[in-house]
Amino acid sequence: MVYLYIIQQALVWIVTIFWLYQFIVSICSLVKLKDKPILEDKQNRFMAIIPAHNEESVIRNLVESLTKQDYPKELYDIYVIADNCTDKTAEIAKKAGAIVYERFDEEHKTKGHALNWFLNQKIEENAPYDAFFVFDADNIVDVNFIKNMNKKLCQGEDVVQGYRDIKNPTDSWVSAGYAIFYWTMNRFYHLARYNLGLSPLINGTGFMVKFDVVKPNGWDTQTLTEDIEFSLKRIIAGKKLGWATDAIVYDEQPVGFKQSWSQRSRWTVGHIQCIQNYTKDLAVATKEKKTLMNFDGFLYIIGSIPMFILTLVLLAINFIMFFANGITATDLIVNILRYLIPTFLLPIGTAILIMLLDKKPIRPMLKGLLCYPLFLGSWLLINFKCLFKRDLSWEKIEHVRDIKINDVA
């Protein structure tokens, strides 16, 4: 029993220090820093790249929002990768003003494969672009997105994540859960790390990459979460990513729980793939480069599934000690609440704070706030399930919300 108590206390300290570190970093999002200086004042030339599989319901709104950017029209082109499409995605995209590349490959259906296929062609052509953006087909883009990303490129940043907002946050408690999660990530993860000189992460859509970055190897990713994989490889190489709060993209999120479960399961499996492939490299980079940025990247990769497993072990030890009469029922309840309150209740207060800071309307989100612990709890169940059963196949998430940029901006 003494050994169990020692292990329990050691694990408590590990979990406490980890979350204290995250809290200290998050506070740095509350400080407004001076803008970086412009290194080269120019209007760059861009590609807007949209991988799309059977997205006829939403592709027009995205292309139209891109054609209306407050940026010289001759300095950017809109490309849609119609990836294994069997509907009118290609036809609608062309009519809306996009250049369409049709791709058919039943064995390699992921977004990463589509991006690599397209970018390799542009690299071979030596296409005259300075950088490119990647969007999901269900997105709509703020009118100042390209202008604000161009500023980041002129400041010397070569990979930059934009602000990922939600275009349907009040559709259901599920879409509200996504909205709260992304609003939290935007401020307390990405902005906080950017302010500290650490590295944010690419977050799936609405990001910019300098064209020169991918010319040596293309878009070389293998996991189901190509965005996280790309980010981790940059961090391992000692290259931080940038953040642009004012480059806003609006994303459609699932309304139903079943579809959300499927999507988040895929993300979790992709994250496990990244843990398997890059934990060692991140640890080595931390040891060799001895920078806080590399250490923070290492903490990110061990702070999800491994920290979840650690918490499960800690709870199991508490129950073992209780049934072995090592601790009282009161001690057991206190220890359980020590994990449940920060995991499920504290995020509600955090979400309200963020919504106040970022001027998000709270009243329409009340149902989502009350159900947010359920959203987070279901994600913990997904993590547990994926420890034992992982589906590596790609499953399409249906997007149907006909929302234009004027409806949300």
Image (cartoon, grey):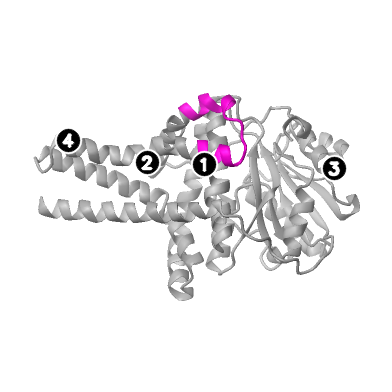
Asked if disc 1 and disc 2 are in contact, CB closer than 8 Å, the reply is no
Asked if disc 3 and disc 1 are in contact, CB closer than 8 Å, the reply is no
Labels 1, 4: front one:
4
- Numbered label attached to residue 67: 3
Query: Would you place residue 84 above or below residue 302 in this image?
Result: above
Quick one: SS at disc 1?
Answer: helix
Location of residue 337 in the rendering, given as x and y in whole percent from the top left corner: 29, 37
Mark 2 lies on residue: 342
Location of residue 2 in the rendering, given as x and y in whole percent from the top left corner: 10, 53
Label 1 – label 2 distance at C-alpha: 25 Å
Read off the magenta span: 352-370
Label 1 – label 4 distance at C-alpha: 39 Å
Label 4 – label 3 distance at C-alpha: 62 Å
- Whether residue 142 can be seen here: yes
Q: Which three-letter amino acid code belongs to the residue tagged 3?
A: Thr
Residue 287 is drawn in which quadrant?
A: bottom left
Q: Which three-letter amino acid code belongs to the residue tagged 4?
A: Thr
